[in-house]
Amino acid sequence: MSQITTAAIQDSPPTEAGTALQTEVAGLIVTALNLEIKPEDINPDDALFGDGLGLDSIDILEVALEVSKRYGFQLRADNEDNVRIFRSLRSLADHIAGQRTL
Amino acid sequence: MTAAAHPLLTHPTPDSIVAWRQGEAVTVAGFLGDVARVAAALPPGRHVLNTCGDRYRFAVGLAAGLVSGRVSLLPSTITREVVGHLRAFAPDVFCLADGNQDAFGLPCVAYPDDRRQDTAPRAIPLLPDDLPVAWLFTSGSTGMPVPHRKNWGALVRNVRAEAGLLGLTDGRRHTIVGTVPAQHSYGFESTVMVALQSGAAFAAGRPLFPADICAAIAAVPRPRALVTTPFHLRTLLDSGVAIPALDLVVSATAPLSVPLARDTEARCHAPLLEIYGATETGQIACRRSVETAEWQLFPGVELTQEDGRTWASGGHVEGKVALDDVLELAGPGRFVLHGRSADMINIAGKRSSLAYLNHQLCAVPGVTDGAFFVPDEETPDGVTRLVAVVVAPGLDATALTRALRARIEPAFLPRRVLFVAGLPRNSTGKLPAEALRTLVAAHPKRQP
């Protein structure tokens, strides 16, 4: 997905389908990582790494595994830049929307 | 007295392949050209914090240090706290980096990449056995990392023994694909050093996702060896991806379950060898996990038990070194591993000690008392995450985690933080494990 398309999605009101997918992916993250928060507590634009949700590379692999099972595609890291896809719930959901086969 | 010496690498000709970078072969001549170029570009400090994520750049940085009298510092993680210790340990330390790694104020030099290989003829450097190669660090019991020096001779003896046991010296010239960082002692020895000392090649990438691992394997010629961990193996097999042909799988950092070992051999059509070692000793044993639970010691290495501890000596091990694990001797050169000592923690291959983590927890401003708790493992080959039990009236979980993040590796950050009025310490101030377990059990996980 080009940067222009990403910006367009972020600037426009979220579509119903996009929001539904975000909620679904938030649930997947909470379940896969056994987190003690509610899926709706994850702000779509908060960082998943670092000071936001605080995921690390172990978590990323666990989530990636669940994503591949649920949505039928394998995540790839461009030049090991997995940070880009996992920057936020929104970016992960956007990536899934563009890649899913299930 | 003339010290013995070993060459930087053992490949037979200048055209031999040392590494693969995105489908491009790097020869011995090209590697030596890069080593000379990078060595000339290093600043004056004698200690290098080599954070290069690319395995090839890491290896060039390591070798550039070796030929110019610089020692690499290889901490298991880089946090503000760790960098503070490194500065105190080696005030002239500088960082050699190939990405945007935060070096927390250390002087930094960017890896000077140049893909044109300078293949001018160069002699392979001969390095004395007593040359210090690297300092590795383990977490001590007092909050201070404990340094361990790796000398060239011992390191070479260790990885040559490893190469023999793994079958890398059968003349077929393997290519090694690693999922572990080159900075981790296992990755350091079993991807970079073992390749340099067995005429093998290594792939420069460090693939993370299963599909990336498969692409990295497919991008290099056979025979291929995958050097990985139980956690990475489990996610690779569980993902259902088609794994390209492999000729050897190597796993270390934590014992594999037998089902995962069997599954790995069946799906990869290759033998799986597990390696046992520790930062203090290097690698000292291996096993074919589908055939036996017993570990076979490396040639010359011996174990003795006294005072309730197991000690390694002989072979490449310098002196007599205590092991942190609980071992049962099972016959000449063999042992059974019964687990780690109660204080040791291993999360997805990252090791620390409870004493160290508790020290860091209690050093957070606002924490008056605290302790980490290790929940019972839920699944074999899975990952256990820690619980922190804390007395800290003015802090919430977010603030505490943020403060801890500056001190300890992310893998050890607590998944749950339990705020309590006091810890169940006994009259001598000790915190009985059972009391802590009862306390945690009395606070059931909040259902999301």
Image (spheres, rainbow, N blue to C red):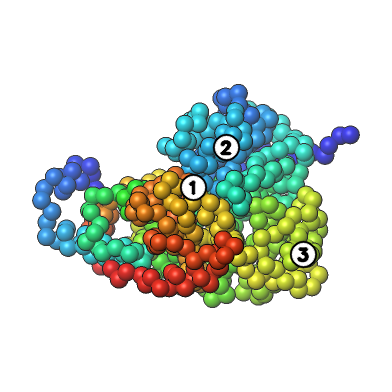
* In the depicted structure, whether residue B295 falls above or below residue B28: below
Same chain check for tags 3 and 1:
yes
Chain under disc 3? B
Labels 2 and 3: the sequence-earlier one: 2
**Relative side of B439 to B226, left or right:** left
Q: Which residue is mark 2?
A: B86
Chain under disc 1? B
Chain under disc 2? B
CA gap between label 2 and label 3 equals: 33 Å
Labels 3 and 1: the sequence-earlier one: 3
> Is residue B239 or residue A56 the one in the foreground?
A56
Q: Which mark is residue B363?
A: 1
* In the depicted structure, whether residue B75 falls above or below residue B272: above
For the point 49% across and 59% down, the residue is B371
Amino acid type at mark 1: Ala
For the point 79% across and 64% down, the residue is B306
**Relative side of A11 to B290, left or right:** left
**Mark 1 secondary-structure assignment:** loop
Q: Which quadrant would the C terminus of chain B be assigned to in this image?
A: bottom left
Question: What is the x, y in percent for residue B226?
Answer: 55, 58
For the point 37% across and 64% down, the residue is A33
Labels 2 and 1: the sequence-earlier one: 2
CA gap between label 3 and label 1 equals: 32 Å
**Mark 2 secondary-structure assignment:** helix
Q: Dot 2, how many residues are within 10 Å of its Cα: few (below 14), some (14-19), or many (20+)?
A: many
> Is residue B444 or residue B435 the one in the foreground?
B435
Q: Dot 3, how many residues are within 10 Å of its Cα: few (below 14), some (14-19), or many (20+)?
A: few
Q: Is residue B246 visible?
A: no
Amino acid type at mark 2: Leu
Callout 2–callout 3 Cβ contact below 8 Å: no
* In the depicted structure, whether residue B224 falls above or below residue B22: below
